[in-house]
Image (spheres, grey):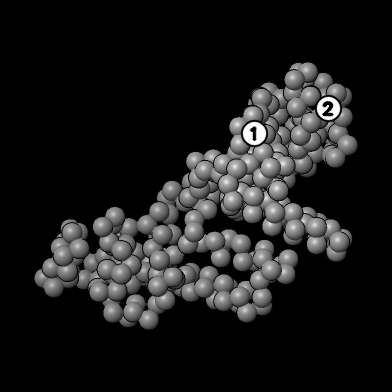
Amino acid sequence: HAGQINGTTGYEEAAAQGIIAGINVVLSLRRKDPLVLTRDQAYIGVLIDDLVTKGTDGEPYRMFTSRAEYRLLLREDNADLRLGEIGHRIGLASAEAHKRIKDKREQIAGLREQLEKSRVLPSAEMNGTLESFGSAPIRVPITLARLLRRPEVSFADLVKLAPELRLIPSAVGLQAEVEIKYSGYVQRQLEGVERSRKMEKLRLPDDLDYGSVQGLSREAREKLTLVRPRTLGQAARVSGITPAAISLLSVYLKKKLA
């Protein structure tokens, strides 16, 4: 019934809310802090944050990938790397699974380093193989990582150029390929995450009286009182809250903490 209560539609959306509710009930009974997934950690984090800060505007809410500003980070292929540590911490992932994920992370880092260092030399055979991939020939020595950055070259293709890569698990190879091929785009999103986290670290008091914040409009006070965001970053995502209102809240927090 989570979807009906909170205004969402779809089995996945309801299941997502249900599992978070169940996890947090157990954490509450254990007198531990609740699990709050952020927007850069999981689509569940995006869904719940949207429901809390923006509401449904009279229409049932669906979780579309376009709603996630960090969707390049929220990929199916890295779900275990993103959430495995959290799952182990709250008791949903076994020690064996946790070790497997840790080993995979180390393998990916090692493979990336190997690809950045390993070079192939230009030759008739090498260029013939590259042309069979639909890729341009090389005239100077080039790293495997640079070759992998070419849109038409996959990790499976690299294995044909460097047979020593055949022992690499396919999941590790795929993850290294994605991280190398799209490193520029991913890095820009990581920089955005870091800027957002700075605002998320500014915690708003649970009993904050928004009526006492000078300069806030009546609409802003009513919306913030209704939503009661946990952080300044979450307050910025509340529908109708302007950058000017966030600046006023920031000044208010600095005075309170001074």
Q: Nearer the viewer, residue 176 or 47?
A: 47
Neighbourhood count class around disc 1 (C-alpha, 10 Å): few under 14, some 14–19, many 20 upward: some
Q: CA distance from mark 1 to mark 2?
A: 23 Å
Q: Nearer the viewer, residue 194 or 236?
A: 236
Q: Nearer the viewer, residue 75 or 5?
A: 5
User: Looking at the image, can residue 198 be seen?
Assistant: no
Which quarter of the figure has residue 226?
top right
Determine the secondary structure under disc 2.
helix
Residue type at mark 2 is: Tyr
- Residue occupied by mark 2: 210
Which quarter of the figure has residue 62?
top right
Locate residue 201 relative to residue 179 in the image: left or right. right
Across and down, in percent, residue 68 comes to 54, 43
What is the number of the mark on residue 44? none
Q: Are marks 1 and 2 in contact (CB under 8 Å)?
A: no
Across and down, in percent, residue 247 comes to 71, 27
Neighbourhood count class around disc 2 (C-alpha, 10 Å): few under 14, some 14–19, many 20 upward: some
Q: Nearer the viewer, residue 114 or 223?
A: 223
Which quarter of the figure has residue 234?
top right
Q: Is residue 23 above or below residue 4?
A: below
Q: Earlier in the sequence, mark 1 or mark 2?
A: 1
Across and down, in percent, residue 227 comes to 76, 34
Looking at the rendered image, the disc whose residue lies closer to the viewer, 1 or 2, is 1
Determine the secondary structure under disc 1.
loop
Which quadrant is the C terminus positioned in? top right
Q: Residue at image x 40%, y 77%?
A: 168
- Residue occupied by mark 1: 56
Q: Residue at image x 51%, y 53%?
A: 73
Residue type at mark 1 is: Thr
